[in-house]
Image: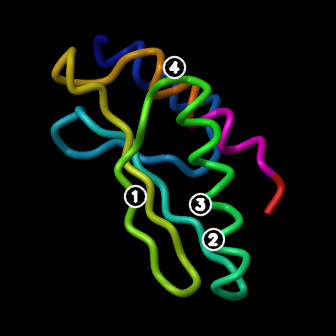
Amino acid sequence: MNTQQIHEHLASLKDWELDSNKLIIHRKFQFQDFHKTMGFVNAVADIAHQENHHPNMEVGYNYCHINYTTHSTGGLSDKDFICASRIDALSF
């Protein structure tokens, strides 16, 4: 995926950012408490399973930081943006 395509896809997402190497999109989500955080993490796991595309996640008491990249292509693919879009549609 070239830089122009990446930026076009990013424009349709909410608060996702591109890493400096243009290989990863990431976003940090904040929550009121651990229970809401884990509900979100489980919803992301369901999306990952349905799309067969799994993010790297860092989870804490009231946050979840998500990174998407496509290892098989060595960068970003449509799958990364599809999953990010589905995550944006979650109501938490």
Q: What residue type is labelled 3?
A: Val
Marks 3/4 in contact by CB < 8 Å: the verdict is: no
Q: Name the residue under label 4.
A: 8
Mark 4 or mark 1, which has the lower sequence index? Answer: 4
Above/below status of 8 relative to 10? above
Q: What stretch is highlighted in magenta?
A: 84-90
Q: Mark 1 points at which residue?
A: 57
Q: Mark 3 points at which residue?
A: 41
Q: Position of residue 25 (x, y in %)?
A: 38, 41
Asked which secondary structure carries label 2, the reply is helix
Mark 2 or mark 1, which has the lower sequence index? Answer: 2
Gap in angstroms between the C-alphas marked 4 and 1 = 24 Å
Marks 3/1 in contact by CB < 8 Å: the verdict is: yes
- Picture quadrant where residue 41 is located: bottom right
Gap in angstroms between the C-alphas marked 2 and 4 = 31 Å
Gap in angstroms between the C-alphas marked 3 and 2 = 5 Å
